[in-house]
Image (cartoon, coloured by chain):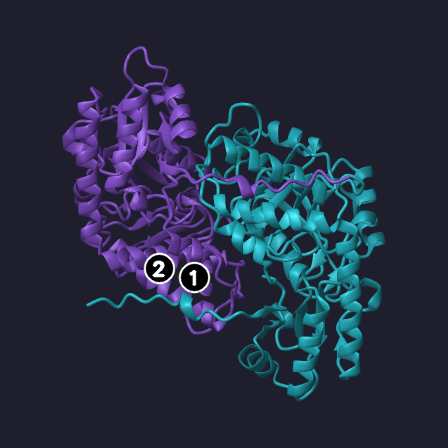
Chain colours: A purple, B cyan
Amino acid sequence: MSTNQNLLNDVEEVLLMGPGPSSVHDSVYRAMSVSTLGHLDPYFIRIMDAVKVQLQQVFKTQNKLTLPMSGTGSAGMETSFVNFIEKGDPVLILINGVFGMRQKDVAERLGAEVDSLEFEWGTPVIVDRVKDRLDNREYKIVSMVHAETSTGVANPVQEVGKLVKESDALFLVDAVTSLGGMMVDVDKWDIDIIYSGTQKCLSCPPGISPVSVSKRAVEALTSRKSKVPNWYLDLSMIVKYWEGQKRAYHHTAPINMIYALHQSLYNLLEEGLEPAFVRHQKNHEILVEGLEDLGLQLFVDPSCRLPMLNAVVVPDGVYEAEVRSRLRDEFKIEIGAGLGPMAGKVWRIGLMGETCRPESVDRILDALKKIL
Amino acid sequence: MSTNQNLLNDVEEVLLMGPGPSSVHDSVYRAMSVSTLGHLDPYFIRIMDAVKVQLQQVFKTQNKLTLPMSGTGSAGMETSFVNFIEKGDPVLILINGVFGMRQKDVAERLGAEVDSLEFEWGTPVIVDRVKDRLDNREYKIVSMVHAETSTGVANPVQEVGKLVKESDALFLVDAVTSLGGMMVDVDKWDIDIIYSGTQKCLSCPPGISPVSVSKRAVEALTSRKSKVPNWYLDLSMIVKYWEGQKRAYHHTAPINMIYALHQSLYNLLEEGLEPAFVRHQKNHEILVEGLEDLGLQLFVDPSCRLPMLNAVVVPDGVYEAEVRSRLRDEFKIEIGAGLGPMAGKVWRIGLMGETCRPESVDRILDALKKIL
């Protein structure tokens, strides 16, 4: 007797307004189901090359080493640390949320000597405190999160980049949530190592992680004393598959996910980066106005709010999980809960990529009005 | 001016007869494009639970810790080592091809004290030599590859498992190419840690890696002295997302890839494991007969040939790359080249999963006849 069950027929279409994944455009779903090619097929290699160029455009970089890693955004994070850290390396992490803490955990596991600067959650990294620290100690890597998805805060990456440039450190940035929804300017901001995800403002299903690495960081990689302690994510081997005339097999790339990324980057570049940023900002403002009309408060000060991730304070006496449940069940809308110490205190409403449309804002405001 | 290019419209349908990816069933393509749900959505969690049960059936195991990792097969390999190795741990690796060598590289990077036993490529692991070694030294892990994709050899996993069981070591097996195409019996063969890929006999596009871990191995994991030096693949955290009543976010799972895996496992279980193994064996035999009729020779002795991966000796005077090129261009068939020291010496013809049909055998034989 078979207990074999196929659950896919009953998947409902949900408006994804959480902290990611975001809703996916039909063209990207179609891309996912284009015939699988071999990972060394000459035509697939053309697609890989096109994706690299697209990523350079979206990251605003000339970095040759710009490619999607075969894992979700957190694999990009792991890549960004494991390739550049050797045991005992001094690393400074700027922390004002879950994703900064995560970077610290990653770096420590790899044997780095981690220093951290912590800032109040819901407020941005304070540049002067970073300056003080950098004036007093040398680091191999200084790392921070651009869009802190756990709180909805935009951190001053460009300003910190200027400080790091004056030191010898490599500047490492998490752009998982920011890329495609707000300005990320790798070359101008002197970022050496950056990673992102696909399921946020790129609106591609989760599964791969764009990364870009500067020439300086590549030099640090090639002058390592020890092998990268992670075979799967070793960029020095992976580039031999992603670059050059003769491609060397490393691992089998996630072909159809790369199709999907190609399509989603195509869509974004057709719209244009600036127009996409304006769209994110505009819908964010309409959402905030509507939330305030409902008597709700944003967790973060307007001066440093992310456009694509809105942390909303749960009003006193409201059971936050029930609201999310009703949104999902009655209105087919997903929003996010608070993460870590923010659990129970905020909802996180995403306006990322394809989700970031006036219709989405209308739907969530209408639903919240009915529920609250 | 935009140089934005969309290359997906011109992807040709290629019959994938290389060492993977294999051809994908339409139902799996459709599954990939089912609406993306949130990674904590209650319905998605039901799908995750179903996938775990499906994987237990396919691996033939009761192991509670059985789940797909968010990366390709090599991420499963990395997972299988990084969670169980601490610096200085003695590890024995049995090597008779590229994928055994890869295991050695992975284990060494993680600081294991690696011993290896090497066997001639194209021949199987010799059980008596393993016995000798195990009689003389204790290991934390003994590791081997079931289906050595670089040579087409089936290794005696069950026999080695019996020996390892008599020692205290954990038994680690690469089942990337074997799973779904030939018997893999995790519980009966006393396998403690096993990983596979999706793009071989499961005929799901590459991107995730099924793993299964025995209770003994879980105990080894929980009694580690140091944290797993890989945040992304740390099973002790990942289980909190894949198991239990309340699911804790770790990383955003590759939702649509998990849909695809669910569908491909559904397809396999509908057919039945035994019938699928018989189909692989039968088509393999027809292929071999046809190849021999064309005057071609198999690289591996019939006693240890894999059904799903056929290494064919390139005849003298034939330029192997040109044959592959013509197959791809004129006949829309992909076959694989030799890997590592086998480069130029063999072709690798895959008969994996959906590819493993009489029509595929006819097409490749017909094409080779015309070319050679």
Residue sitting nearer the eye, B89 or B257: B257
Q: Where is residue A342 in the image (x, y as percent from the top left)?
A: 34, 22
Answer few, some or many: residues within 10 Å of disc 2's Cα (few below 14, many 20 plus, some between 14 and 19). many
Label 2: state its secondary structure: strand
Q: Which amino acid does label 2 sit on?
A: Leu
Position of the C terminus of chain B, as image quadrant, is bottom right
Left-right relation of A7 to A292:
right
| Residue bearing the label numbered 2 | A65
| Residue bearing the label numbered 1 | A239
**Image height of B365 relative to A348, above or below:** below
Q: Mark 2 lies on which chain?
A: A
Q: Position of residue A347 (x, y in %)?
A: 32, 25
Image point (53%, 58%), residue name: A251
The image quarter in which residue A137 lies:
top left
Contact, mark 1 vs mark 2 (Cβ under 8 Å): yes
Label at residue B307: none
Mark before the other along the chain sequence, 1 or 2:
2
The answer for how far apart the CA atoms under marks 1 and 2 are is 7 Å
Q: Mark 1 lies on which chain?
A: A
